[in-house]
Amino acid sequence: MSSMSSLHIQVGLPTDLSVTAARLYADAFQRKLSPILGPRPTLEAILQAALYPPNAIVALHDGALLGLAGIQHQQKHFVDVGWSHLRQFHGTLGALGRAGLGLLLMRPHRPDELLMDGIAVDSSARGQGIGSLLLEAVCDFAHREGYARVRLDVIDTNPGARRLYERHGFRAVHTQSLGWLKPVFGFGSAIEMVKSVKGETP
Ligand SMILES: CC(C)(COP(=O)(O)OP(=O)(O)OC[C@H]1O[C@@H](n2cnc3c(N)ncnc32)[C@H](O)[C@@H]1OP(=O)(O)O)[C@@H](O)C(=O)NCCC(=O)NCCS
């Protein structure tokens, strides 16, 4: 899809990298996901079981995974956690409470928007432009597939990521407060940001 020196960006996670992808995703989103999926290593195990490899845009360097951006495409999330995953790892009662919490982070599906499910770069490779390349690749993909916009959420405790999105043309359109659940998830609100990709040249 695109490359810079020996860095390669492609659509689709090679399936043999699912374990690494789950680790990378857990490193980046542990604070937000653990209340729903559980502490490590359960978090990593559920992610690994629930990953849908085609719905990721990944950055590879000599075959090693340096970063990934999950996308929701053709009705599938990159991290597609279902009731069966929760019940397998937490039992029926535990799964009920966790599914309830999960509903709070759900976003409505809008057919003309590509939802970015989360972007993460290996901590040793941040600040070198990989996140920017992944974001551009997500927007190119959205344009090619005929979506009008790309949508993502950024939490209020992550101003660095918000700056990155703004530099790439994303604009905040809505803020959803977590209210009394702030201590559970460790952030107070999620800001929805969108970028139009209609007129873009891929
Ligand atoms: C956000 C993230 C994907 C950016 O990837 P990256 O490869 O470092 O991005 P780039 O090199 O293209 O751009 C760097 C910019 O990312 C942002 N950034 C956020 N966290 C950063 C970190 N730990 N190290 C470096 N940059 C970071 C900054 O805005 C930085 O630019 P600036 O500080 O000069 O304004 C990466 O930092 C990451 O994986 N963070 C943890 C997971 C996360 O927060 N994901 C976003 C959830 S909404």
Image (cartoon, rainbow, N blue to C red):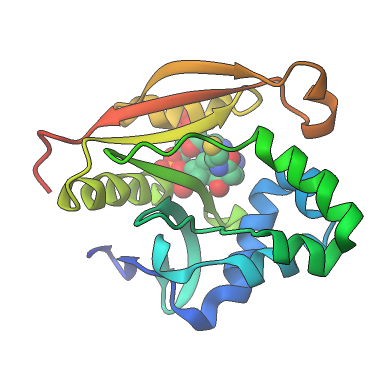
Quadrant containing the N terminus is bottom left
Q: Residue at 44% across / 35% down in the picture?
A: 152
Residue 7 drawn at (x, y percent): 34, 66
Q: Residue at 28% across / 66% down in the picture?
A: 5
Q: In this orientation, does residue 186 appear?
A: yes
Q: Image quadrant of residue 2?
A: bottom left
Q: Image quadrant of residue 106?
A: top right
- As rendered, which of 87 and 36 lies closer to the eye? 87
Residue 188 drawn at (x, y percent): 71, 20
Figure check: 141 above or below 14: above
Q: Image quadrant of residue 8?
A: bottom left
Figure check: 132 above or below 90: above
Q: How many marks?
A: 0
Q: Is residue 201 left or right of residue 43?
A: left
Q: Residue at 42% across / 47% down in the picture?
A: 131
- As rendered, which of 178 and 25 lies closer to the eye? 178
Q: Is residue 129 left or right of residue 195?
A: right
Figure check: 191 above or below 67: above
